[in-house]
Amino acid sequence: MTKTIAFIPVRGGSKSIPGKNIKFFCGKPLIYWVLNELNRSENIDSIVVATDSALIKEKVLSFNFSKLAVYDRDEKNATDTASTESVMLEYIERAKLNDDIIFMLVQATSPFTQKQQFEEALIQFSKQNVDSVLSCSRLKRFFWDPDGKPLNYDYKNRPRRQDFDGQLVENGAFYINTVVNIKENKNRLSGNIAIYEMPEYAAVEIDEEEDWILAEKIMYKYILPQRKTAKIKLFLTDVDGVLTDAGMYYSENGDEQKKFNTKDGKGIELLRNNGIKTGIITSENTNIVDRRAKKLKIDYLVQGASNNKLEKVKEICAKENIGLENIAYIGDDINDLELLEKVGLKACPNDAVDKVKTIGGINILETKGGSGAVREFIDKFII
């Protein structure tokens, strides 16, 4: 059978958004999203990330994707002025690829592409007997030229949106061709070209900070709704560094104080209203936490659980007749590691320790502990 290679060129020298290819996007490095979908696809035989950055190389290899390899691209083909075709041809020549190999160019800055879309496009490429395929989105916008002439509609008979076909625009998600065509034409596209149509939101590419903000909103709305699942029956949180900023405050009388965030409290109320039970589990044992738990109407309060959080949670699971996969937990430090590794849905504040951030499948939030991290976790991933 013909082999299919997915090729993802990424440079370390992005200027508009420094380090954007491995900057955290919706809790994962940006490049993770396309690599994960490609690795899941049965139609992709191997994945090659071509980079000039040791940091990017280290990061993508840490994902441990079975199909993934890293190619160290030449510096001359990793400059601001170098074309994508130059690194494609460089790799094809160095790897001595067979002419009949299907070569899919994939952009890391288009994180919306899903496994099914890669597979459908590859099937289309094979069945339609075309030379190449590119991904496009349909924009229902009215275009004009600089001379004030409409390009795609009659302004005297303006159509309704639902009756307007719009225009197909190249969205940069992926391009499919064969090695022989790329070598002959020195281009990602050639010959008889077919279009694989994707949703309109897939036209958003991440090139500027404003794009990043919009793209995350799109990701949470269209791509990640499956994260918000009825499977979660119990929400648990640590205290210091999560519900608080981990600071130690003392009154003039020497009384210890903690600062909580009201947004987190509202989030816990929203969970309760949605039928999800809540709990606090902490290594400390203070009256402050006890009072806060009562105010928030927490179902389970476990204090003094320094090195046995997992065991305490298993006891709660037995009472509730649920499994660890039904639990969402947010923690920030090494005493949370064991529990975080076992639960079904996990997150940490942005200022959590590095060991927590490297746990497989963890969602690293944009918010710091004590600043609404719990609310962000609840809003984005649970309800």
Image (cartoon, rainbow, N blue to C red):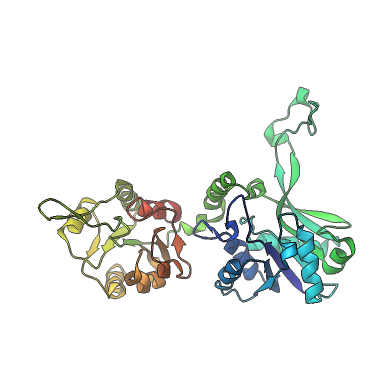
Q: Is residue 323 visible?
A: no
Q: Is 264 placed left or right of 291 in the picture?
A: right
- Is the N terminus in the top left, top right, bottom left or bottom right quadrant? bottom right
Image quadrant where residue 35 sits: bottom right
Viewer-proximal residue among 178 and 71: 71
Question: Looking at this rendering, what residue extends furthest in the top direction?
Answer: 156
Q: Where in the figure is residue 231, as x and y percent of width and height?
A: 42, 62
Residue at 56%, 61% in the rendered image: 22
Image quadrant where residue 114 sits: bottom right
Viewer-proximal residue among 145 and 316: 145
Image quadrant where residue 49 sits: bottom right
Q: Where in the figure is residue 53, as x and y percent of width and height?
A: 62, 66
Residue at 13%, 55% in the rendered image: 255
Q: Is residue 96 above or below residue 115?
A: below
Q: Is residue 41 above or below residue 14?
A: below
Residue at 48%, 67% in the rendered image: 361
Q: Where in the figure is residue 163, as x and y percent of width and height?
A: 72, 35
Q: Where in the figure is residue 94, as x and y percent of width and height?
A: 79, 74
Q: Is 25 placed left or right of 188 in the picture?
A: left
- Total number of numbered discs in the rendering: 0
Question: Looking at this rendering, what residue extends furthest in the left direction?
Answer: 253
Q: Is residue 317 visible?
A: yes
Q: Is 31 placed left or right of 273 in the picture?
A: right
Q: Is residue 15 above or below residue 105?
A: above
Viewer-proximal residue among 29 and 363: 29
Q: Is residue 33 above or below residue 61?
A: above
